[in-house]
Structures are given as C-alpha cells and as structure tokens.
Image (cartoon, helix red, strand yellow):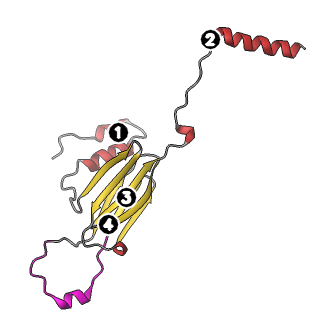
Amino acid sequence: MRTYDLTPFYRSTVGFDRLFSLLDRATLDGSPGYPPYNIERTAENSYRITVAVSGFSQGELSIVAKENTLTIKGEKTANENAKDKAEVLYRGIAARAFERVFQLADYVVVKNASLENGLLHVDLVREIPEAKKPRSIQISTSAQAAQVVDGSAEKAAA
C-alpha cells in the first residue's frame, strides 16, 4: 500500500514526467513475479540480465530493445502431439506467456543474448559517446598565457 501521493510533483514540475511515472510503476502492488530474474554487474559498464525461462525454446522467446526499454516476451506454442501422449495430472512447471519490461539508462545497449540450461542471458553495455565523456582541461598560469600572447604579437609585427 502506498503512503504518499506524487500528484503535487506532477503539477509543479516540468520535464520530470518520466521519473515520476517510473516511481509510480515501481510502487504498484502485485508486481508480477514470473518469470524470476537476476540483474548482475559483470564489469564497470557491463551488466547481465538472467531470466529463468525453463520450458521455452529459442523460437518462443523474443527480445526487443526500443529507446530506453528492454522487453522480453515468451509465448508457448500449442504442441498438440504432446497432449495426445500423456494426461497431465499436476502442472508445477509454469508454461504461461509472459512479458517482462526493463527500463534502461541512457547509452545502455544490448550486446548479446543467449539461452542455455533454461536461462536466458542478456548482456548489456553502457557505451557513453566521446562527446559526453568528461575531459580534463589543462590549467595554465597567467605568466604562460602572457608569454603566448606576447609571442603572437611579435609574429604579427614581423
């Protein structure tokens, strides 16, 4: 149960809609727990999402990366031949369709996806463009700056 209201923030801020929408979604009750997943940091700018997709084949899974959203969907195809062979008395292994959505930070891209032993691994890397990376600026003293100005004036006079 939520004990706070974000409505005043929506009314008094401009440009923070996405942030408040994420907060609203994060606090919703009854968030789906299927399928279970892990999010790991494998290096400074590398991440891995592992989703337990036991019983799904590669053709029944889809991964879509659009803008800052990663969507993983699984949909079982009806296999009529298996139903004719045996009657299921108890179904403990979930085989229902699912959709899991992850919000990605800026400059995070999907590098690889693999399915092994019932686990779907999605590797992500944050690639910051050179223009956005911090750069160091050399600081000069006033004496060095004056020398450069004087030198350029002498060249201009000659």
* Residue that numbered label 3 is attached to: 122
Q: Which residues are magenta?
A: 73-92
Please state, as top left, top right, bottom left or bottom right, where the C terminus lies in the image: top right
Residue type, label 3: Val
Label 2 belongs to which residue? 141
Task: Give the Cα distance between marks 1 and 4.
Answer: 48 Å
Q: Is residue 76 magenta?
A: yes
Which residue in the protein does label 4 denote?
Answer: 116
Q: Earlier in the sequence, mark 4 or mark 3?
A: 4
Element assignment for label 1: helix
Q: Look at discs 4 and 3 and give the one toward the viewer.
A: 4
For marks 1 and 4, give the one nearer the viewer. 4
Report, in whole angstroms, how far the alpha carbon at label 4 lies from the one at label 2: 60 Å
Q: Which secondary structure, mark 2?
A: loop
**Mark 4, other Cα within 10 Å: few <14 / some 14–19 / many ≥20:** few
Separation (CA) of disc 2 from disc 1: 49 Å
Would you say the residues marked 2 and 3 are in contact, meaning their CB atoms lie under 8 Å apart?
A: no
**Kind of residue sitting beneath label 2:** Thr
Measure the C-alpha gap from mark 2 to mark 3: 50 Å
Q: Where does label 1 land, which residue?
A: 11
Q: Position of residue 116 (x, y in %)?
A: 32, 66
- Report whether 121 appears left or right of 89: right
Q: Which mark sits nearer the N-terminus, 2 or 1?
A: 1
Q: Nearer the viewer, residue 74 or 141?
A: 141
| Tag 1: amino acid | Arg
